[in-house]
Amino acid sequence: MGKTTVCPKKGNAILNRNISDETLMMRYAKGDVGAFEELVERHRQPLFGYLCRISKNRELAEDLFQEVFIRVMNSRSRYKKSAKFTTWLYRIARNACIDAFRRESYRKTESLSAPRAADREMETTLENVLPSSNPGPDMELERKQLSEILKKCIERLSPEQKEVFVLRQYQNLPFQEIARVTGASESTVKSRMRYALKSLRTMLIEENIVEGVTL
Amino acid sequence: MKCDKAQSLMLDHLYGDLKPREQKALLQHVQACHTCAEEYEAHKATVSAFKQVDMEEPPPGLSRKIVATAADRIEQQEPLPAWNRWAWKPALATAAAAMLVIVFLINNPPAQKIAHVAARAPSPGDAQMLEKAAPPQKPHMAEPAQMVEEEDVSRYRKTTEDLRESRGSYKENNLRFDIAATDKVGGVASESHMAGLKRAKKIEERPLPISEATAALPVEMKDEFSVLRSMGWTDRDEVEGDSKVLPDSEGEELVAASVEVYSKVPQAQESQAPESPVVRSQAEETGKGKLAYLGADGALEISQARLEKAQNEYLAGNAYFGKGDFDRAVLNYQKVIALASGEELAAMSEYRLGRSYQELELFEQAISVYKEIIKKYPDFPERADVYMAVGECYLGLGNADEAIKNFEIVLDQFPDNREVAREKIGQAKLQQKVSGEEEEPPPDDKD
């Protein structure tokens, strides 16, 4: 056996991106909090984004964010080496969302039935933005407003389509993995994705964000 | 290619998941089919537009709070996962006894926060390492909770600093204690004890770190378990030495003297640690007779002692492994393999040795260890994991071909792991693509 380096690795300062999520999770399962910290760091933003999209409510997303990681903590000893971490994490996230919706403790009354009105409002605001001498803030504002419109479009998707679209587009999970997270077959997942993209395109055309003919 | 196939493939292609051959086939279809071409362009524009979504940032305090909660839970001694699903045969009872002794040591002296196994060369997270070294967890585990004073995540890091600060008083207390123990035995006995130790088979660089107290002891007593022995814990192998090492009657006398020495110490101990049934029973045993251990069953007893030692090494290795200190874990596991070759324990240690090398990114070493397991232990229950690990190591070395070979073995022979194997093959092929190697024909589509 070859000689190994003398300096011990610090359990609480894992910055090596070559260490896979799965390895980190196994380490955390054995008690390495540093590994857990690294996992949180890696996944906090995409997970939070996912929760915001699915829950449509930032406050609820924050609660769910904690809930997801608490469930991760509670299940750490049950994590299997062979399981892909993101699949496991997003399955937990999905279940946490479903449970939250069932509880309905954060149900808001904002309706999705009048998105048109809201979007029209957005358009009006856009139109009313007066060009100033400094292009920076305007562009920034436009960018933010565009982002908001796009988010509203995503919200208008059916839950099944939204889930698939968000996981593919923002969590960058392959379709096979999405199938495992959602419990559907890969062909169903792809079918939902296809319809999601078609619906979104229709919305984009209506919002004049893209030009073209609806498919 | 039919349109429905193209519609499916184009979704993969949008996100770069298509292999070159499939890309080529899709392109051919799209060039010929106007409908699909339109659909593809439309999807592409949609995906591109939705890249402009600004994802929300989670509030920073949230992550900190979560990590702090995780650190709290670890410190509160959540039950450890069962790593080894094997039955440890009769050695389980001995392992349990060894664990109880370790727990006893951690709880004694009570004033101290850390066990006698405090690190010689301090490394972070020692508290966790110690806690890990003593499963199952006792509810009143030393005072690790007292180390945690802050709310934020840095409390975890602070732990090791507290640990270092506490060493001064710990050292003092233990020195006093040890002196008291050696005083009890008397001058002559202690000399023969020293001599016995010199003659007895010693474990050389045992990586299990020794306490400051041990470090402060005279050189002759510095083998790692000397402190433990002075506490009354009789490691039979250490006490009596190997029968091969001490064949003569003088050796036997030394052994006997040592045995008597240790039989006295626990009585001084009892007032300090009444809750140590394992130690007491061992003390009773030693009092029975000087040749209690070197009887006709001498060989068996020694083998048992070796197994105990191996188990201790294994525990220590696991503790280091859990902490991410793979260099030390390697040394422990190597010891286990040397001590208990052929046993299940050794097989598990081989696996963990391989994992340790892998974590250290010493992929060639890891691969050779894993291949040894495959050869030597055909009944190894985690065989699929071993092949997977070999594949991962090859990936680490950039050898996608060999990686794929191993993942395919898993795919063929281990149905439970099929999904992960497929994923890994996908990853490996991606690596091949990146490095520009020749593509294999695409597998059958599942749609």
Image (spheres, coloured by chain):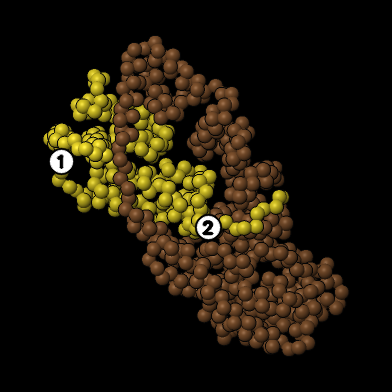
* Residue named by callout 1: A111
Residue B263 or residue A105, whichever sits in front: A105
Image coords of residue B38 (percent x, y)? 32, 17
Q: In which quarter of the image is residue B39?
A: top left
| Numbered marks: total | 2
Q: Which chain is brown?
A: B
Q: In which quarter of the image is the C terminus of chain A?
A: top left
For image coordinates 27% across by 39% down, the residue present is A136
Query: Relative to B249, is B157 on the left or the right?
Result: left
Q: Which residue lies furthest to the front in this view?
A: A133
SS class of the residue under badge 2?
loop
* Residue named by callout 2: A11
Decide: few, some or many residues near mark 1? Use Cα within 10 Å; few <14, some 14-19, many ≥20. few
For image coordinates 63% across by 77% down, the residue present is B213
SS class of the residue under badge 1?
loop
Image coords of residue B360 (percent x, y)? 61, 50
For image coordinates 34% across by 54% down, the residue present is B60
Q: Which amino acid does label 2 sit on?
A: Gly
Image position of B181 with respect to B353: above or below: below
Image position of B318 with respect to A122: above or below: below
Image coords of residue B26 (percent x, y)? 43, 18
